[in-house]
Image (cartoon, rainbow, N blue to C red):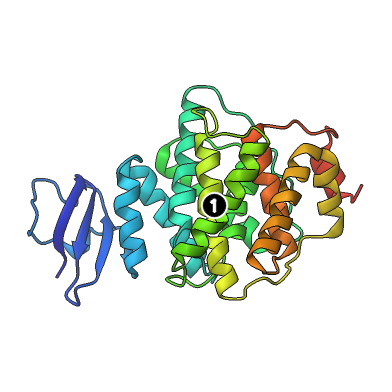
Amino acid sequence: MLTIVQIFNNNVALIKLNDNRQAIVKGKGIVFQKKKGDQVDVNQVEKIFYLETAESKENLYFLLKDIPIDIVTTTYEIVDVAQKTFGFSVLDYVYITLSDHIYGVYKRIQANDYHESLVPDMHTEYPTEYAIGRKAVEIVSNNLHIQLPNSEVKSIALHFINAQGTPGADKLDESLTTSVNDIVQEILNQNHILRTKENGNYYDRLMVHLQYLVDRLNQSDTHSSAFTESLENSLENSYPSSARIAKEIFDNLQKQLSATLSDNEKLYFIIHIQQLINEQPKNTDINGGIQNGK
């Protein structure tokens, strides 16, 4: 039995299963003229997304405050495909960061104000994440009836690179999180980087990344992955200001937390900060330079 807990629109609802688990169900007219407590016809269910953890339930309600349900269900579908088709495990916070990203891109495309991301091309180092990104672009285009630029493949791939991990494992240590945020915000303030209306989404995304950086420290998940030395050099050459601030954050976190961070974190910081300050690349052939190791 699928019992309706909350109706979002005629095609989407939150339901409770017999074992008291909750899930989002989607199907054309699936809850038309129904109400809370009614049963959903299982034959009308086109897609179902299980909320397996308390974190995933909290994330759902957090998202629904500001993001349309069609964006949210599209995000859940992308994550579901990543997990089931590609066997890719992600931390629950990807639902927040990816929904926020997709909604932002959707609004910019609708307003004819889209600008291609300057995230470097890393498809050689992260083939699975890029395959997920390509599938995600297809899902977004089908569900939301917009054509995403090809550059969105690398932007979405970055979300999965950042969020790889075991679902439900991202439990935050509040005292450490506060310390990390204080350290980073002090350095940002010293460099005159403040949260504004224009950069708010990027600023908040950096804060979310920092929260789960704490969790990666707790799990001793500080291994270096496939970022190459040439990629690091290319980013530093192309975005010197962002790289300087990122290094300051990286060094201060290691010193004040008495922890060893992965070199990947420094590169994530460069990308996040570049988005915050919109630093233009010194080398206009940024992707080509990275791919060729220049």
State the residue in front, 84 or 213. 213
Q: Which residue is mark 1?
A: 181
Amino acid type shown at disc 1: Asn
- Residue drawn 67% across and 50% down? 269
Rendered-image quadrant of the N terminus: bottom left
Q: Is 54 left, or right, of 128 in this rendering? A: left
Q: Is 21 left, or right, of 221 in this rendering? A: left
Question: Quarter-wise, where is residue 25 in the image?
Answer: bottom left
Q: Is 255 left, or right, of 52 in this rendering? A: right
Is residue 47 something that shows in the picture?
no
Q: Is 204 left, or right, of 224 in this rendering? A: left
Where residue 271 appears, as percent x and y from the top left, is 68, 45
- Residue drawn 69% across and 39% down? 274
Where residue 154 appears, as percent x and y from the top left, is 65, 48
Where residue 29 appears, as percent x and y from the top left, is 19, 47
Q: In this rendering, is residue 214 above or below 152?
A: below
Where residue 91 appears, as percent x and y from the top left, is 49, 65
